[in-house]
Image: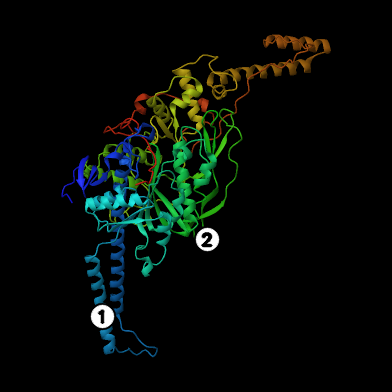
Amino acid sequence: MQTQPLADRLVQYSGKEYHAVKEGKAHILNPPSQAAASKGTKKHLQSNDEVQSVFYNPIQQFNRDLSVLAIRTYGEHLIALKKQRADKRKRRGADGKAKGKKRKREDGNGEESKVTGDNVENQVETGSQPALESHLEQSSAPSFAILDALSATGLRALRYASEIPFITRVVANDLSPSAIQSMKLNIEYNGLGELIQPNNGDARTYMYNTLNSPSTPSCEKYAGKFDVIDLDPYGTAAPFMDAAVQAVKDGGLLCVTCTDAGVWASNGYPEKSFALYGGVPAKGTHSHEVGLRLILHGLAASAAKYGLAIEPLLSLSIDFYGRVFIRVHRSPAEVKYASGNTMLVFNCDSGCGAWSTQPLTQTKQRLDKKGNPFHHFGFAQGPMANKTCEHCGMKTHISGPMWAGPLHNPHFIQKILDMLPKVDKDVYQTVDRIEGMLTTALEEDLSLIGSSGNGSPEPTTEAKDVAPSEDLAIIPRVDPAIREPYPFYFSLSALSKVLHTSTIPTDHFRGAVRHLGYRCTRSHTKPNSIRTDAPWSVIWEIMREWVRQKSPIKEDALRPGTAGAAIMVKSREKLQKVNAEDQQLDMLKRELMLAVENGNDVADVVTKVEAALYRSGSRHVLNQDSDPRPAYPQRVSPVTKQAPGAPTGSSNTSTLEVIFDEALGREATKKRLVRYQLNPRANWGPLSRASGRE
């Protein structure tokens, strides 16, 4: 084998010619006839181009770079945790030995028991045991095993083995025999045969077999559960979820990719989405976050059946796929929070785009007789939304059930970000985009930023299994009872389209939201997106004020019966007109009552009533056939729902002082970040499925 493989050029190996592709520190050998299949979709292939026998997509280098860094971060956490637990066991053993020497045992008669020679020998042997265990712990590093369940060319396994220094074993599995041949060739070419074990078989069968005892001879190739399992299929990962949550160790990491965004992030296949993930998607600009929550819901439901609880560490919607990193804990007590962290969404997809959420159950904190807090689980009242949208009157549709908890663990994201300045950009060529996307994902947590929104977020999640003064590599746990209070995001262009006005600039909108005391940030899934804790009533009041103050529209721009017309009915100008007409009605009512009370006869009453109507501006005659009641606009009921901690004491949003403070809305960025994907090349995308032919 060559000592220094050549990258991205033709090489001779084992008497054949290959195209050597370098990614990270790994190299894969691709036949020249298949090179075109890795650079375009099927419709762009020529007649003499060969279809891929093994799937390889260079566009997913970002996915693989991120996966290596995420697994490395988690691995450092796991090794530090194992060492910490070993130290605790050692100290516990030393404390037990010291307590045993403090006093001699006495028998029932109060006499001291004598120590025989055999007991002395046993004490000597027992005393030497901790030293022997300590020597073994120092001589052998903690194990760290990874399963690449759908490995194809083996590129992920190659990168894990060559770029993560503390890995002890990687199993690269694939169902295709041609993929195994390609994998073995690449493993040999990279010189990683001692770390990587290829396996030809069904990934589900392999993961289920790891549940058997590894001590039996029939299970030699199934050496127990894995610290990390990576699922990166072509399409959905739903068929592998049940086996994966069982095959990963307690506290292990599960990395899942789903490339079927046309199912979980669109409104075309609700029945397919329910079959795969147990929930129905949503129509709207926030559909990609809904899709991530559907994937997490599918994983949580698969794990809960076995007393396993999931903790999302990082959930990203990237290009044409979703990628989630979750930690799996064996804890029947935490599984009880699963129903409370599951919600339905009532989505106004045919109108203004607003939504409201409905948890399946309630989780409330109570105090026991001793004053200690505990959580009580009960039924949730429902429904919490009407059939029609409270803002525009259009029909709403149900989405879900889906995951309602946090999408990320801020400590995990921060540890990856802290690692980025130290990595080699020649190895991790997408590090700039990783930094931008992870920074944006970290900023999504509104609880980590102030109302100004200009401060850098700092993780404040409470650590459950480690104190803050412990090893810095350990990733604290997120409270399983936490529910995401402000899920989803919206697009300013979509809001402006509803009102047929010019798109409000992002800085102007953020400035108005922050001036009212609410928090505001962006979403990693789409550019020009807004996440905020302001209720929809305040959001639409800001948009109405944008139309009134900055971007007026024509009176006939909004047709009656549309969502925009219903929203603009609540504008301040029309509310003032309604209030003025109400005052006239009250005055007319008083005059009519006085006319009836003080009239001498019927003719006198009629005369006084006509005079009152004339003074009020009405020309109606009492004996007309038409309805004498004037057609007044429908009164708008005051808004009663407010976000928790809303700064204003008024229940009517028309009294809010909306100021479009561009300076307040401008982000104080210290560094220019690549937050969103730029097209890397022409015809990029998911590519075609591998044929499996040799």
In-front residue for pair 476/691: 691
Residue 130 placement (x, y as % from top left) = 26, 73
Q: What residue type is labelled 1?
A: Glu
Residue 422 placement (x, y as % from top left) = 21, 44
Residue 36 appearing in the image: yes
Task: Report helix, strand or loop for mark 1.
Answer: helix
Above-or-below relation of 172 to 592? below
Q: Which labelled disc corresponds to residue 125?
A: 1
At horizontal 78% and vertical 15% (from top left) the residue drawn is: 598
* Image color mode: rainbow
Marks 2 and 1, how far apart in space?
A: 49 Å
Residue 411 placement (x, y as % from top left) = 33, 47
Q: Which labelled disc corresponds to residue 369?
A: 2
Residue 7 shown left or right of residue 277 in the figure: left
Task: Find residue 145 and report its image quarter.
Answer: bottom left
Residue 432 shown left or right of residue 361 in the figure: left
Total number of numbered discs in the rendering = 2
Residue 216 placement (x, y as % from top left) = 38, 70
Please tell me how crowded label 1 is: few (under 14), some (14-19), or many (20+) other residues with Cα within 10 Å. few
Q: Earlier in the sequence, mark 2 or mark 1?
A: 1
Callout 2–callout 1 Cβ contact below 8 Å: no
In-front residue for pair 490/470: 490
Task: Report helix, strand or loop for mark 2.
Answer: loop
Above-or-below relation of 90 to 42? below
Viewer-nearest of labels 2 and 1?
1
Q: Which amino acid does label 2 sit on?
A: Lys
Residue 400 appearing in the image: no
Q: Which labelled disc corresponds to residue 512?
A: none
Please tell me how crowded label 2 is: few (under 14), some (14-19), or many (20+) other residues with Cα within 10 Å. few
The residue sitting at the right extreme is 601
